[in-house]
Image (cartoon, rainbow, N blue to C red):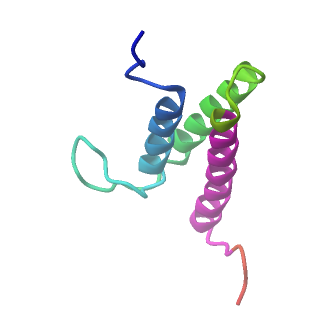
Amino acid sequence: MSEPLLSFTSFVLSLVNTAAIHFGDLPDPASGERGGVNLAGAVQMIEILALLEQKTKGNLTAEEWQILEQVLYELRLRFVEARDQQDGKRIIEP
């Protein structure tokens, strides 16, 4: 039996890329341009990944679980950073 074309890891990373587009970190593939920050869209991607984490717990390989945990951690930090930038706050004062 051949490997599936879409793996769990590639699916997770596609959601991460979508979140990065919503954060304005990557260009929109349709237009090729970076849009503004869409926190609601980014939050939706984080919530989808958190749902996957909850529903797949105990059913993933160690590598898949580690990737999912790491991207959730990084996206949550990125959300706080983006939210604080929108509110005019700085995370660390000089």
Q: Residue furthest left?
A: 31
Q: Main secondary structure of the magenta part?
A: helix
Q: Is residue 53 left or right of residue 14?
A: right
Task: Identify which residue, 40 or 15, lies in the foreground.
Answer: 15
Specify the quadrant of the image occupied by residue 17: top left
- Residue 48 lies, in percent from the top left, at 61, 29
Q: How many marks?
A: 0
Q: What residue range appears in magenta? A: 65-90
Q: Residue furthest front?
A: 1
- Residue 33 lies, in percent from the top left, at 26, 55
Q: Residue at x 39, y 14 (%)?
A: 2
Q: Is residue 84 magenta?
A: yes
Specify the quadrant of the image occupied by residue 81: bottom right
Image quadrant containing the N terminus: top left
Q: Is residue 18 magenta?
A: no
Q: Is residue 60 left or right of residue 21?
A: right
Image vertical order of residue 60 relative to residue 24, above or below? above
Image vertical order of residue 86 relative to residue 54, above or below? below
Image quadrant containing the C terminus: bottom right
Q: Residue at x 23, y 40 (%)?
A: 30
Task: Identify which residue, 5 or 53, lies in the foreground.
Answer: 5
Q: Residue at x 66, y 44 (%)?
A: 72
Q: Residue at x 57, y 63 (%)?
A: 86
Image vertical order of residue 31 relative to residue 50, above or below? below
Q: Residue furthest bottom?
A: 94
